[in-house]
Every structure is written in structure tokens, then in C-alpha cells.
Image (cartoon, helix red, strand yellow):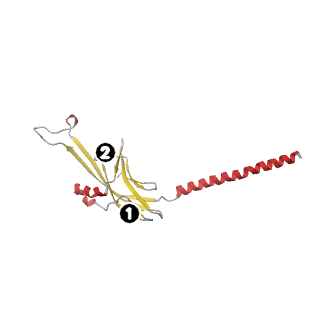
């Protein structure tokens, strides 16, 4: 009689673990399914850098001879002004069935000892670049504006312009460049510019 009670207690005890084991197995499978769904579905957006052109600006600043002298920088050296303007033609595509809201754009040039970050020029300043540097006019394309909505499946193409306080020599020695396009409520799109 005692052995019959022991068997029934063991049966009851082993049956009480069965629902817990099933619940754990279901939770693990659900977590694995969510992971696979999140990381194997296509990105909400895609993009491509179609072309990149640069203009290097190098000036030695000074007021010229004044009373036989000229204005110079530290240790009698001329003050030097370097700027690099990067014009990038890009294409962005919405790969979802919902609208995407392009919010902002910036570029980062990776130099040997630091990174240089620049916001894309504003709509207002876009035309001013081509007025200030008329030799860039043949490269002008339609602006890729901020704060646009890409409808489901829509593809847009346009130019973004960045300005960096670096020399052409620093640009030539860069380790890379990334163009980032931020979207509201989505991960940003980062496009790498191949070193030519």
C-alpha cells in the first residue's frame, strides 16, 4: 500500500513539471522566431552613392603689404584656410509598404587621427554653393531635400553637399567616408563612400 502511494505521488510530481517545460519551450521558440523575423527581413530602406565630386579650397590669408609688412599668423607664417566641398549624388529607396520620413542628413570623413562631421547644406544654401563656386555649376543636380516623405516603394535621387575644414591632402589620406540619412521612427540609412 505504501508503494502504491509513493508511485502516485511521483506521477503527480512529474506531471506538474510538464506544463512548465512546455511553457519554457514555447517561450524559447517564440524568442527565436522573433529574432529570425527581425534580422532576416529586408531593410526598410536601401541606398546607393552614384557619384562623388570634391572641390578643394586653399587660401593663404593676409591683408597684403601694409607699410612694408603683411599680416601673418603664428611665428611669421601666413594664415592658411583649407576647405573641402563634397558633392554626392545619391539614390534612396523605400522598401516597405508604409511611408518613410527623411529627417536629416550628415556625412563623416574618417581621417587618420579624427573624424570630421558635416551636416548636408540646407535647401537655402544649396544654390549659394554654385554661385560662390561657378566652376561647380556643371556638376549641379537636383537637391535631395530634408523632411520629405517617401511613399511605399518610392525611390528618390538627388545631390547632397557637405563642407569640411580639411585640406585635399587630408582628404586623399582618409580611411573612409559615411553618409547618414536619418528617418523618423526608423534606423538611419548609412552609405559608405568608396575611396577612389
Q: Quadrant of residue 69?
A: top left
Looking at the image, the residue that sits furthest to the right is 1
Looking at the image, the residue that sits furthest to the left is 67
Point out residue 76 in the picture as x, y percentages from the top left corner.
Answer: 19, 35
Q: Label 2's element?
A: helix
Query: Which residue: 31% across, 45% down?
Result: 170
Q: Residues within 10 Å of mark 1 (few under 14, many from 20)?
A: few
The residue that disc 2 covers is: 170
Estimate the spatial distance between the alpha carbons at disc 1 and disc 2, rounded to whole Å.
31 Å
Q: Label 1's element?
A: strand
Q: Residues within 10 Å of mark 2 (few under 14, many from 20)?
A: some
Point out residue 132 in the picture as x, y percentages from the top left corner.
Answer: 22, 54
Query: Which residue: 25% across, 59% down?
Result: 137
Q: Earlier in the sequence, mark 1 or mark 2?
A: 1
Looking at the image, the residue that sits furthest to the top is 75
The residue that disc 1 covers is: 156
Q: Quadrant of residue 36?
A: bottom right
Is 154 situated left or right of 11 in this image?
Answer: left
Query: Which residue: 28% across, 59% down?
Result: 139
Which sits in the foreground, 117 or 12? 12
Confirm or deny contact between disc 1 and disc 2 (CB under 8 A): no
Instruction: Residue 141: give its label.
Output: none
Point out residue 162 in the picture as x, y percentages from the top left corner.
Answer: 32, 52
Q: Nearest to the eye among marks 1 and 2: give it.
A: 1
Tag count in the figure?
Answer: 2
Which sits in the foreground, 15 or 25? 15
Q: Quadrant of residue 128?
A: bottom left
Which sits in the foreground, 137 or 1? 1
Amino acid at each position: 500500500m505504501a508503494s502504491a502511494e509513493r508511485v502516485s505521488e511521483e506521477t503527480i510530481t512529474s506531471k506538474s513539471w510538464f506544463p512548465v517545460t512546455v511553457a519554457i519551450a514555447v517561450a524559447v521558440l517564440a524568442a527565436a522566431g522573433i529574432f529570425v523575423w527581425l534580422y532576416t527581413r529586408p531593410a526598410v530602406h536601401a541606398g546607393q552613392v552614384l557619384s562623388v565630386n570634391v572641390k578643394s579650397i586653399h587660401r593663404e590669408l593676409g591683408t597684403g603689404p601694409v607699410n612694408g609688412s603683411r599680416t601673418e599668423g603664428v611665428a611669421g607664417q601666413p594664415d592658411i584656410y583649407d576647405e573641402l566641398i563634397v558633392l554626392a549624388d545619391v539614390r534612396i529607396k523605400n522598401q516597405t509598404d508604409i511611408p518613410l520620413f527623411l529627417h536629416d542628413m550628415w556625412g563623416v570623413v574618417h581621417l587618420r587621427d579624427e573624424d570630421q562631421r558635416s551636416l548636408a547644406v540646407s535647401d537655402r544654401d544649396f544654390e549659394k554653393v554654385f554661385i560662390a563656386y561657378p566652376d561647380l555649376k556643371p556638376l549641379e543636380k537636383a537637391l535631395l531635400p530634408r523632411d520629405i516623405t517617401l511613399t511605399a516603394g518610392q525611390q528618390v535621387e538627388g545631390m547632397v553637399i557637405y563642407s569640411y575644414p580639411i585640406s585635399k591632402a587630408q582628404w586623399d589620406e582618409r580611411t573612409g567616408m559615411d553618409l547618414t540619412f536619418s528617418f523618423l521612427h526608423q534606423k538611419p540609412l548609412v552609405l559608405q563612400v568608396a575611396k577612389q
